[in-house]
Image (cartoon, grey):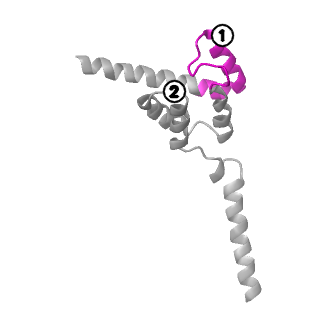
Amino acid sequence: MRALVIFVLLALLAAGAYFALRDGGWLEQVTEDRVRAALMDNGVPEPMAVCMAEKMTDRLTISQLRKLEQLAPQAGENSIPASFAEASARLQRVDDPEAIRILTETGTTCGVGLIGDQLKSLF
């Protein structure tokens, strides 16, 4: 009986480890809060970060989020790129075209939506 209990506990532990560590498992899931925080840490205004995080959460892996962290300014760089060349250099550091595509699509969609909301409030 004791051996059976130990076997069941080991099986449950193995199943838990599988779900936590497998590709796309619990440890690999990107949370909306983490995406929003990363965006805001890099100078994205809160309303834009909230919109983008909501849309990006299901589309980015943790690996892609880590790659996007390469957009953050490094020593000697401005917090916001001062030129096209500086912005281009940061994008090249990411080295993940899919992550950049998701970021730009989401940023465009949210930016247009927020501008539309601002225009509606004027009229």
What x and y, as percent, mark residue 44? 49, 27
Q: Residue at x 58, y 12 (%)?
A: 82
In the image, is residue 85 part of the stretch drawn in magenta?
yes
Mark 2 to mark 1 CA distance (whole Å):
19 Å
Q: Residues within 10 Å of mark 2 (few under 14, many from 20)?
A: few
Q: Is residue 102 left or right of residue 23?
A: left
Q: Residue at x 67, y 25 (%)?
A: 74
CB contact under 8 Å: marks 2 and 1: no
Q: Is residue 88 left or right of residue 45?
A: right
Residue 63, placed above or below residue 14 = above
What x and y, as percent, mark residue 96? 70, 27
Residue 97 in sight here = yes
Q: Residue at x 49, y 21 (%)?
A: 108
Q: Quadrant of the C terminus?
A: top left
| Label 1 sits on residue | 85
Instruction: Tell me the number on the disc at residue 43.
Output: 2
What x and y, as percent, mark residue 23? 71, 48
What x and y, as percent, mark residue 91? 66, 20
The answer to which of marks 2 and 1 sits earlier in the sequence is 2
Residue 95, placed above or below residue 17 = above
For numbered disc 1, what is the local secondary structure? helix
Three-letter amino acid code of the residue under disc 2: Gly
For numbered disc 2, what is the local secondary structure? loop
Q: Quadrant of the N terminus?
A: bottom right
Three-letter amino acid code of the residue under disc 1: Ala
Q: Residues within 10 Å of mark 1 (few under 14, many from 20)?
A: few
Residue 114, placed above or below residue 66 = above
Residue stretch rendered in magenta on the structure = 73-102
Which residue of the protein is positioned furthest toward the bottom in this rendering? 1
Residue 3, placed above or below residue 56 = below
